[in-house]
Image (cartoon, rainbow, N blue to C red):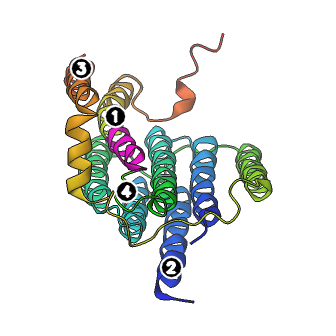
Amino acid sequence: MPIQYYIFLCLTLFSIGVIGVLTRRNAIIVFMCIELMLNAVNLLLVAFSKMYHGAALQVSPASTAGIDAQIFVFFIMVVAAAEVSVGLAIIVMMFRNTHSVDINFLNRLKN
Amino acid sequence: MNTLEILFYALSAFAVVSAIMVLVSKNPIHSVLWLILVFFAISGHYILLNAQFLAIVNIIVYAGAIMVLFLFVIMLMNVKSDNEPQKKLLVKFIGVLSGGSLLTLLIALVKQTVQLEGKQVLMKEGTIGLIHPLGKALFSDYVVPFEISSVLFLSAMVGAVIIGKK
């Protein structure tokens, strides 16, 4: 499978996430779209790692080139889990103060 | 067209349609369920790429833990879908337009890139995605970041508790 197909798929998923962040006002949906963008990047990293692994296998059969990207994806997942716990706590606090999850209430820094 | 290509196209279409449904559905709970389907499609892609450890971790961490947390928060808040404020139609149109132009621009750039031409992704072969080489690399070369991530988790836990108690 050519690498371009994976790039196109991941770009599509990433752009859908961008559109969601730009068009929705529910803070939880915006947060979910950010998760979608993270996952698109993860898939692209794994595809690139397999691309380099395939190229390195032709040089030496025992090569483990490309394993760094998969470790990187693992760490992205770890950081995403921590990020979600803090982010959802912030959203819950925002809901308690404003009784809404509308991000347009959060414009107090505007003026 | 062989089986791998059919699976690739089917999983890609499934992922993209589910991702669009995340945006389109009015009810936040439906959005969460569609997003879980996106994560399952991406896990299927990982299995196609023989990254089995990441496929399992993706299902356990994302579809299992994170999305359950989202569902829990949505049900805790009892957000009604009918009184959710909508953005103006013009703003929505501009958002879709800017996202679409970003996509077009990036696809045009990738199509022009000479370095990517003829590069193939190794599918269903290669052992780097299995748990044995990944564990070896994680606990030899990457053991310091691994330990630091535990500190990150501790600080995230403390932060979430402190924010939640206010």
Q: Nearer the viewer, residue B33 or A34?
A: A34
Question: According to the image, label 4 marks what residue?
Answer: B29
Tag 2, which secondary structure?
A: helix
Q: Are marks 1 and 2 on the same chain?
A: no
Q: Earlier in the sequence, mark 4 or mark 3?
A: 4
Q: Residue at x 56, y 72 (%)?
A: A1
**Residue B144 vs residue A55: left or right?**
left
Structural distance between the alpha carbons of marks 1 and 3:
12 Å
In magenta, the rendered stretch is: A65-77
Three-letter amino acid code of the residue under disc 2: Ala
Question: According to the image, label 1 marks what residue?
Answer: A79
Instruction: Tell me if residue B150 comes above or below residue A15 in the rendering.
Output: above
Question: According to the image, label 3 marks what residue?
Answer: B155
Q: Earlier in the sequence, mark 3 or mark 2?
A: 2
Question: According to the image, label 2 marks what residue?
Answer: B10
Q: Residue at x 49, y 42 (%)?
A: A34
Q: Is residue B93 visible?
A: yes
**Chain of the residue that carries numbered disc 1 in the rendered image:** A
Instruction: Tell me if residue A25 comes above or below residue A42 in the rendering.
Output: above
Q: Nearer the viewer, residue B100 or A71?
A: A71
Instruction: Tell me if residue B85 comes above or below residue B125 in the rendering.
Output: above
Is B84 inside the magenta-drawn segment? Answer: no
Question: Residue B138, position in %: x, y?
Answer: 24, 40
Q: Are marks 3 and 2 on the same chain?
A: yes
Q: Are marks 4 and 3 on the same chain?
A: yes
Circle 3 packing at 10 Å, graded few (<14), some (14-19), many (20+), is some
* Label 1 with label 3: CB-CB less than 8 Å: no
Instruction: Tell me if residue A28 comes above or below residue B111 in the rendering.
Output: above
